[in-house]
Image (cartoon, rainbow, N blue to C red):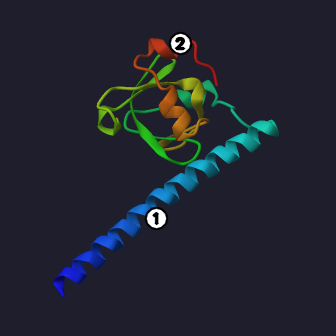
Amino acid sequence: MSDIKERLSDAGHKVADTAAAASHAVAEKAGQAVDWVKEKVGMGAQQAPDAEVAGIKKGMNILASCGTKVGAVDHVDGNAIKLTLGDSPDGLHHYIPTSWVKRVHEDHVHLNKNSAETKSGWKPSAAGCAGCGA
């Protein structure tokens, strides 16, 4: 009897994990679709004013345009934001250009890139962000 309960429990966990992965994939694709539509109608890829970028503080969460947390602010280094090691998927520091900032809220930073674009475009140093545009 306990073997059946364990199998059911394992199956339940697998279903929950699969549902969570599917939900994340749907959210990611929905974010990409929104970005695409905004770009096509001339509403996308706008960056925050410098005054807002100046409001970026250590510890703020960084949210991609799809709503996924991609890291937290370690500090601002010129025209780049250094992400903390604690949220790094590979144990390395990553930098993103301030030109990717859409707006700064009280406790978080919103980007104009989705999480896939952010992760594929982040840099290993602040110098790598020098020529990055929106």
Going by the picture, which residue comes out furthest to the left? 2
Specify whether 133 is left or right of 5.
right
Work out whether mark 2 precedes mark 1 in sequence or the reverse, and give the earlier one: 1
Q: Which residue is mark 1?
A: 19
Residue 50 is situated, as x and y percent measured from the top left of the image, at 60, 24
Residue 91 is situated, as x and y percent measured from the top left of the image, at 29, 31
Residue 36 in sight in this render: yes
Q: Residues within 10 Å of mark 2 (few under 14, many from 20)?
A: some
Q: Which residue is mark 2?
A: 130
Residue 96 is situated, as x and y percent measured from the top left of the image, at 49, 26
Q: Residues within 10 Å of mark 1 (few under 14, many from 20)?
A: few
Q: Quadrant of residue 100?
A: top right
94 and 55: which is toward the camera: 94
Residue 63 is situated, as x and y percent measured from the top left of the image, at 50, 42
Rendered position, 83 above or below 27: above
Going by the picture, which residue comes out furthest to the right? 41
